[in-house]
Amino acid sequence: MKSILIVEDDSFLSDMYQTKFLSAGYDVRVADDGEQCLQALKDGFRPDVMLLDVVMPRMDGIELLAAVKKDDNFKNIPVILLTNLGQESDIKRGMEMGAVDYLVKAHFTPSEVARKVEEIMKTRG
């Protein structure tokens, strides 16, 4: 079964994405912030892909991305940044840090996000 870890502090959005991916047959885990995400990974959950919000309390998505990419156990997990930050500099920074895609929430419906995740999973084998 395909699995996804959604890291999003807005419960309305995380519920919406969780519902979308559950209906597509994914094992879905949700973390409210970067610390919860790292705990899920340390507890042994290995998602096929991670969706990260950037603006979150305690540990933002950029800090989380850096932590994931520097850990040999997690660095190969594809990470998609899903955020409202649409500045070119934000996008460039996220991609340079190792994200496989950068989606601005306002530009994509949950169905489009799910299609993007599917595309990334196909290219990853």
Image (cartoon, rainbow, N blue to C red):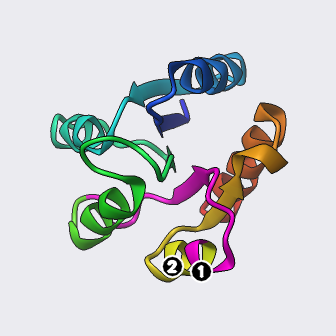
Q: Residue at x 22, y 41 (%)?
A: 35
Q: Is residue 111 left or right of residue 31?
A: right
Q: Residue at x 69, y 63 (%)?
A: 86
Q: Residue at x 39, y 43 (%)?
A: 56
At mark 2, the secondary structure is: helix
Stretch in magenta: 74-90
Q: Give the amino acid type for the residue marked by disc 2 in the picture.
A: Arg
According to the picture, the residue beneath numbered tag 2 turns out to be 93
Q: Quadrant of the N terminus?
A: top right
Place residue 111 in its image quadrant. top right
Q: Nearer the viewer, residue 44 or 93?
A: 93
Q: Is residue 115 left or right of residue 9?
A: right
At mark 1, the secondary structure is: helix
Residue 94 in the image: above or below residue 79: below
Residue 93 in the image: above or below residue 79: below
Residue 111 in the image: above or below residue 94: above
Specify the label residue 89 is tagged with: 1
Place residue 57 in its image quadrant. top left
Q: Nearer the viewer, residue 71 or 32?
A: 32
Q: Residue at x 71, y 45 (%)?
A: 105
